[in-house]
Image: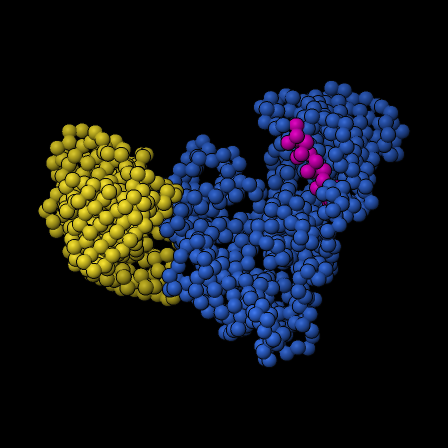
Chain colours: A blue, B yellow
Amino acid sequence: MPHIRILDEMMANRIAAGEVVERPASVVKELVENSLDAGASRIEVVLEEGGAKLIRVTDDGCGMDAEDAVLALQRFATSKVAVPEDLGQIATMGFRGEAMPSIASVSQMRITTRRHDADEGTMITIEGGEFTDARTVGCPPGTTVEVGQLFYNTPARRKYLRTTATERGHCTDWIAWLALARPDVAMKVSHDGAVLLASPGRGDLRAVISEIYGSNVARQMLPVDMDTGVLRIHGLVSRPELSRTTRRTQVFIVNGRYVRSSSLGHAVGEAYGILLPGGRQPLCVLHLEVPSELVDPNVHPTKIEVRFRNQGEIHNLMQQAVEEALEEAGLRPGRSFERRPGLPPEQAGRWKGPGFEEQTRARRLRLNPFFAAVDERDDGLEVHAAEPVIEAAFERGSQPERETTLVAEDRLEALGQVAATYIACRAGSDLLLVDQHRAAERVIADQIAGRDGGVQRQMLVLPMTLELTGAELAAVEEHRERLNEMGFQLEPFGGSDYICRSVPAALVDGSPEAALRSIIEELAEWGTVGNDEVREKLVATIACHAAIKSGQALTDREVHELIEALNASPTPAICPHGDPIIVTVERGELDRRFGRTPVTGAR
Amino acid sequence: MLNLSCPQEQLHVSVQTVSHGVSGRSTQPVQNNIYLESTSSGMRLVATDLEFISLEANIPATVRDQGAVTVPARLLTEVIGSLAGEEISLEADDHSTLRVTTARSSFRIRGMSAADFEMLPPIGDAARLEIPQRDMHSILSRTVFATSRDETRPILTGALFKIASGGIDVVATDTYRLALSNLTVDTTLEDGRSAIISERALNEVLRIIAADSDEPVGMVLSDSQVEFQVGAVKVGSRLIEGQFPNYEKVIPDDCDRSVTVDRAEFTNTLRRMLIVAREDSNRVVLRGSEGTLSITADSQDVGHAEEQIPAKLEGPEPEIAFNARYLLDALGALSHDEIVMQLSQPLSPGILKPADADDYTYVIMPMQIM
């Protein structure tokens, strides 16, 4: 095992400080990650009373000698980072070195450890951070850490523990994520004597999923594997028939570490597109292997959030990887026609209709500055582009008609409103139905996001006062700058109150206060997320609140204005939340339904 | 059983007026109807959403039998409106069906039992004052437009009436601007009263009073309700409960520069600028310099518009951006030849008021580009 060193103060400061130990689950996470770092192939976790009474983690890893074990408990001792340069290449999980001393200071801890090459082991007992005993013992190789009576000396923290069931749930969530992250390590967890989970450790992800979500789920998962040479995405995604209402069952693992990322979740959702009804989310367990210099996990002490150097690129590659998996399974129409080499450009790139697929792709092309560099293998729209850097073409606007807006014959022509919710349109010989709320969201989001020089804001005669909960306060403090950029000028107003002095001008005819409250609630719920994502979400939420609602009757003029504005949008088919705006009923479909033989010449 | 006859014209006007009290959104179907009653002296028509609007009209009629019925408002309005200039006879039967007959025509309108129709409770212990219609029109027309449409902040969907012995303040704000109109009048009220009155009721009052009439508007105010009496029509409403924001605090007193312009000229200029500005949140930029006020509008998608008008400037040269629509709202409510804007920093509130009167203050918040 690498030797443990004490980080100097500068190093300690460079690593974001913060509370590591929140609840038993955070202890479980830290200890199991330490075991993984120690090269364990089997890890056993024993919990009592939701972990509040006892957490015992036993591994068969490399173990420590007495000196290392003591050092491990000093603050900022870590064997993984020595100098600032190293921070760029963090490859192990528990690099912060804060965890063990923090845990030791709020519990009764006992560490029993033996190196594989040593004859005898060491047992150290610490109470509330004070060493009470250290002795030589006989024990199997590896390390056992027992954490008893968590928060026994900090009654305030202990009071905040939830019920045994809740805490147990959080612990098993973490072990499940870690097991999914490392299918090669056998993990077993038991609670009050009952085995909750036991992963086989054969390196078979499907087997781990079967253990956690059941064999029925495991059977319905499709393999994903994409390797660009620089980056690899692999794992399993669910068939569309298997979906959930939340993204909780979407697990992303970046370089072996479980992360949360609504960007990646969004990418997966986009790949399914209309295969899933609105509001449904696929299940997935996806591993990303990226060069560690492209990832900055040093964002928050609990390290759940990752930040990618080029979030947009990763998003698009993730979407592409999942799309390919779905195509492979025959669930998503392939683009074999468009992919055929040697096709004249005007045919290869020309849209067959303002369909979802093509526009999703156009959007990806447009949004992804790295696209040309990383993706040469898949793609209809790309074939016709002789220039290697497609983005440049878009920037110069040399082919804007074809790529980024609807071609003339595919422009929507409004026919009328249906059920005060949809707008019936015609494009070429197809019938299209447009969701009016989503269409308006798209138009407004384009305006907000596309405006040079920032968002217009309207100052308020009477500032709004916001009373915030703890989580909301944290979210507002963290994202105040982004909120300000979007037009909400927030200032602390004592205690947990904030006042808001301005609102986005787009919202003045709506309910800006309601919009801001829902934004803050969402931010609080997401926890830590990247700035770009926050910005994207804010635009979507503002657009949602400013947009005309479903069920709102529109005049003919309003209908036409909306459809004209949608025609001008670069991404008329997808609303800012990622849901489809347009449903197309092709001429052929109409003919079929009427039992009419297709007319010659009709497509 | 209701049985009466009355001239078509008067009935038509009353039905039209009262039908505004129907919200159409009531969960009790009967509340979407107009209530018709024959009394000993004539006919009474009522429509109410039981909350912020209640409209009642009383008209003379030849009553043959007393009783009441309710019928769908729109249907009744259309039927009565179609029977031009004749004496109309209304007769209800046991099944709440209303027969509408003239010498030639006969309609049967299916209604609902009047027994289920609810009304606002009679206004209880109340203060009463009278104001000439022209004065009421002036204070309402300059303020009510500034009430908020945002139903998540109910207090701001009404205007505050602050009544003291020497006068009345009416205040409305949607948080982007605040309109304050003051009327000096002996209210004969010894202790002051405040009430927040729904924009719905106030707009109905505005609709039925005349801007140039000296006839009085009666205003009856209890702790929970208000009733305006205009001739034979009564407009009632529950008061909006809650604390209206402290409006005096938001009126700036540190404006160090002023711009005086011709109201009509400024209005026409802003309307032209709005053609461009409306594509980008209605934003116009005002810059004052050497006897002119320049007004510009920019929109990324549309283009640019600019115009200069003569102005009297005092103090440092102003530069500020406003929502043109908010300026036009106030300009349209005023009739004075000249208006003055008192301004300070680009992000500080400005005031718009008549150049030669002190009875109106319009506080308007600027816009800013981030």
> Residue B118, percent across and down?
30, 38
For the point 41% across and 43% down, the residue is: A513
**Between A196 and A117, the one nearer to me in the picture:** A196
Task: Give B4 or A339, whichever is nearer the viewer.
Answer: B4
**Residue occupying the point 64% across, 38% down:** A302
- Residue B76 visible, this angle: yes
State whether residue A478 appears in this view: no
Q: Nearer the viewer, residue B23 or A182?
A: B23
Type of secondary structure dominating the magenta stretch: helix
- The magenta stretch spans which residues? A164-181
Quadrant housing residue B181: top left
Find the residue positioned furthest to the front. B94
How many badges with numbers are in the image?
0
Residue drawn 21% across and 29% down?
B125
Farthest residue toward the bottom?
A600
The picture quadrant where one finds residue A456 is bottom left
Left or right: where does residue B86 sit relative to residue B297?
left
